[in-house]
Image (cartoon, grey):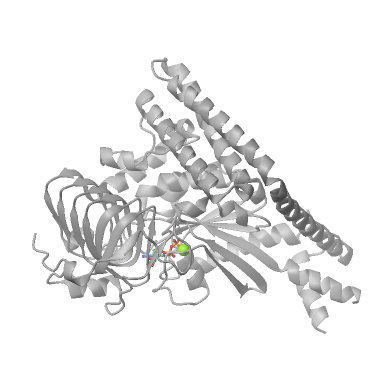
Amino acid sequence: MGLLTILKKMKQKEREMRLLMLGLDNAGKTTILKKFNGEDVSTISPTLGFNIKTLEHRGFKLNIWDVGGQKSLRSYWRNYFESTDGLVWVVDSADRLRLEDCRQELSSLLLEERLAGATLLVFANKQDLPGALSKEAIREALALDEIKSHHWCIIGCSAVTGENLLSGVDWLLDDIAARIFTAD
Amino acid sequence: MDVTAEISQEDGFAGESGAAKIKERLEKRNQARIEDAERRKEEKESQSVAEEKDEFFSKTFSRERVCIEELLSSCSGADRAVVTQRLEEATVKTVQLQKFLNDSVLFLTQYELRQSQAALQKLQASLAETRETALPKKKFAFRARTKAADKVSAPVSDTAQADVATSAPASGEVDGAAASEQCGFSNMDNEFLTKTSEEIQKRDVLLTHLSNCKVRLVGSPSTLHLKHIDSCEILCGPVSSSVFVDHCRNSTLSFPCQQLRTHNTKDTQVYLHVTSRAIIEDCHGVSFAPFSWSYPTLEEDFSVSGLDKDRNNWTQVDDFNWLAAGTPSPNWTVIPEPDRKTNWDP
Ligand SMILES: Nc1nc2c(ncn2[C@@H]2O[C@H](COP(=O)(O)OP(=O)(O)O)[C@@H](O)[C@H]2O)c(=O)[nH]1
Ligand SMILES: [Mg+2]
C-alpha cells in the first residue's frame, strides 16, 4: 500500500462524522432523522432501542444515532457517547409540561466528559404547531446562554414540514469541520 | 486520479496549510481513534473484575445514599440558611451519585441497575419534597396554572437556586404563554367534563389529577397528556401525534392517535386506534381493544389529524420492560370480543 492510498483511507475515515440525537421521548428525533433522509414520516413508532443511519451530505458521511428516549433507556445513553462529534438535542417546543425535565436532562448531559469536545445543536422542533414556544423562549427556558463548555446554536424547525432542518445540520457540520479540519 | 481529487477536495478544508500539516493532523486524529479503541478495550477487560467492582459499587452507593438521606432529614426544623446549605449539599451529592451510577453501568447487572436507579429516583423525589416544604419558593415557569401541574413536574434541580435569578425574565414569558395556552382539566372529582373542537384543535391537552370523571374531548389535539388518572372514562378525538398516559389506574380510555406511550399504569382498558405502535413501560393489567367511540364530526377530525383511518395497529404493543422475543408480555392483554364496551353514552 502506497502512502497516497493510506492517506486516502485515513481521509475517508476523517470525512465521517458521528452525530448523536438525544432529547425526551416524543421530541421528534426519529421524525427529524427520517425526514432528513427523505423517508415517510407518518408511520414512525416510538423508538425501541435505537436507530442508526448513515447518510451522505455535502461530501460528509454522517453516522447518526437516534437513541430511544424512554426512561428505562436514558441511563444507557452514555454508552453511545464515545467519539461523538456533534450532539443534536431535540426539544418538543409545544411540550411546556416537560420543559423543566428537558433542561435538567440537557444540563446533566453536558457534564459528561466523553461529550466534552462535541458541538451542540438544539432543535426547537414542532414550530408548525400553534402552541409552540418560540426558539427564544426555549433558549431561555433551557438556560442555553449559560453553556460555556460547548459550541452551541438553537434553531427553530419542524420535522413535519422540513423547515430549517437543513440549515441546522449545515451549521453543525460547519462547526465540526472547522474544529476537525483546521489547525489548532 | 481518484486519489488526487479526494486530496484536493480535502485541501478545501485545510485552507492554506501545507501537506505536512494535514498529515500531522491526520496522525493526531488517528492517534485519538487508537486511544479510543484502547479505552474501549480497557472497559471490556474491566468487566472481568466485575465482582470486586460490584461490591465496591454497592458499598459506595449505599453509603452515599444514607448520607444524603441524613442531610435531608436534618433539614426539618433547621433555619432557612442552614436548610439552603444542606439542600445544596444534598443536591450536589445526588448529582454525583447519579454520575457514579452512570459510570458503573458497564458492569452492573440489570437488576442492580434498576434497583439503584429506583433508589436514586426516590432520593430525588424526597430532595424535591424537602425543598418544596422547607423553601416554598416559586422556582420556574408553569406555576400559575394549578397545584397539580406543580406536582407533576416537581423537579430536582442542581441549580434550582441559580435558576430563580437567571431565568426570571424568561419565566414571565413562558408563564404567560403556558397560562393562556395549556388546555385541559385538573384536580376534579366526580364530574362530567367536555371540550370542543375549537378549544383543543392542534393543541397540547393535559388532563391531570382526575378521579371518577367522565371526559369527552371532541376534536383533534396535537398531543394528549393523561397524568394521575383514577377511575375515569376518557374519550378523545383523533390525536395527530402522541398520547402520553402516566400513572393511570382503573380507567377506560379511547382515542385514535399516531403513537401511544403508556407509563406506570395499571388495570386500564384502552380502546385504541393507533397508526404506528403503542408502547408500555412499568405497566400491569393494561388491556386493549379497537377504538369504537363515535361522534358526528369524527370523520372531519380524522382528516384534520392526518391519521390514516384504515390503519389500526392496536394489537402491536411493545413492552419496554419485556424485551424477550417470542414470549408475549404478561403486562398487557387483548379484551375478548364479548367483553368489549359498545355503548359510550355518558
Ligand atoms: N406537528 C409536529 N409533530 C411532530 C414533529 N416532529 C415530530 N412530530 C410528531 O411527534 C411524535 C413523536 O415523534 P418521534 O419522532 O417518534 O419522537 P422521538 O421519540 O423523539 O423519536 C410523532 O407523532 C411525530 O409525528 C413536528 O415538527 N411537528
Ligand atoms: Mg424515536
Percent across and percent down for residue B113 are 54, 46
> Looking at the image, is B208 positioned above or below residue B89?
below
> Looking at the image, is B111 positioned above or below residue B224?
above
Percent across and percent down for residue B327 are 43, 67
Residue B131 image-quadrant placement: top left
The residue under the point 41% across, 68% down is A45
B266 sits to left or right of B111? left
Farthest residue, direction right: A2
The residue under the point 75% across, 62% down is A181
Quarter of the image for the N terminus of chain A: give it. Answer: bottom right
Res B182 visible: no
B98 sits to left or right of B205? right
Nearer to the camera, B157 or B255 = B255
Farthest residue, direction bottom: B1
Percent across and percent down for residue B253 are 22, 60
Residue B331 image-quadrant placement: bottom left
Question: In terms of image quarters, where does ligand 1 lie?
Answer: bottom left
Residue B214 image-quadrant placement: bottom left
Percent across and percent down for residue A159 are 44, 67
Res B105 visible: yes
